[in-house]
Structure formats: structure tokens, C-alpha cells
Amino acid sequence: MNRVRYKQDELPPLTEARKAELKALAERPEREIDYSDIPPLDEAFWAQATPNPFFKPVKTHASVRIDSDVLAWLKSQGKGYQTRLNAILREAMLRSLHHKT
């Protein structure tokens, strides 16, 4: 997948033609917008929806108290014990959320 990325201060300048096109679109009334090619987001849509593959949760720094044997077990499996701990907690969270519905 080829993707073009710009930083906010690196965006290409708008041409006069593009500015005129955007102005004309902004001035059109809402009732003139044709939504016929956009399917409704009904229950059937959401039943088949999948999570965004590019979603990355925000990490929060936390200080927790963990039993020594649990921490030793996590560390004994090699590098990345915090990532494993997070994965274990996420799995438990998702399982809990799934059982509530």
C-alpha cells in the first residue's frame, strides 16, 4: 500500500482552482448532497465490522503491585514481559466484555 504522508506544516498549497471548488461545495445546501452511494450504518453493518488494524491504544504509565512469583514467571519467558502482561490483561478484559453481552 502506497501512502502519502504530510506533516501539517508541509501540506502543498491550495491552488486557486481548488479553493474555488471547495468554496462552491461549502456553499451548497445539505439537501443537495447525494448520499445514495453510501450504505446506511445499520445493525447488519456493525455486526460485520472489524477493528481498525491501524489502531494503537495510548499507553499509560502505571505503578502496580504484582506478586513476586507472577513477575518472575513473566520475566522468565524472556524480553518483553510488560508486553506479555498487557496482552494477558487485554485478553481478560475482552473476555469479560464479551461475556457481558
Image (cartoon, rainbow, N blue to C red):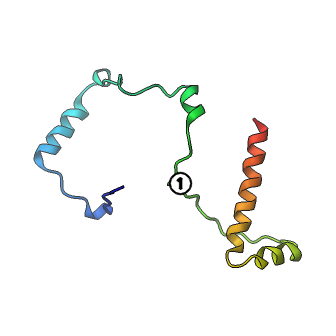
Measuring from the top left, give residue 19's x and y in whole percent. Answer: 17, 44
Q: Quarter of the image holding residue 30?
A: top left
Vertical comparison of 40 with 17: above or below: above
Tell me what residue is drawn at x 24 percent, y 27 percent. Answer: 28
Measuring from the top left, give residue 66's x and y in whole percent. Answer: 84, 71
Vertical comparison of 3 with 68: above or below: above
Decide if residue 65 is on the left or right side of residue 20.
right
Task: Name the image quarter holding the C terminus.
Answer: top right
Decide if residue 33 is on the left or right side of residue 88.
left
Q: Nearer the viewer, residue 11 or 37?
A: 37
**Residue under pointer 1:** 55
Decide if residue 46 is on the left or right side of residue 14.
right
Measuring from the top left, give residue 34's x and y in whole percent. Answer: 31, 23
How many circles with numbers are drawn on the protein? Answer: 1
Q: Residues within 10 Å of mark 1 (few under 14, many from 20)?
A: few
Tell me what residue is drawn at x 52 percent, y 52 percent. Answer: 53
Task: Name the image quarter holding the N terminus.
Answer: bottom left
Q: Name the amino acid type tagged 1.
A: Phe
Q: Secondary structure at mark 1?
A: loop
Q: Quarter of the image holding residue 5?
A: bottom left
Tell me what residue is drawn at x 58 percent, y 26 percent. Answer: 43
Tell me what residue is drawn at x 39 percent, y 28 percent. Answer: 38
Q: Nearer the viewer, residue 55 or 20?
A: 55
Measuring from the top left, give residue 89's x and y in whole percent. Answer: 75, 59
Vertical comparison of 65 with 28: above or below: below
Q: Residue furthest left?
A: 16
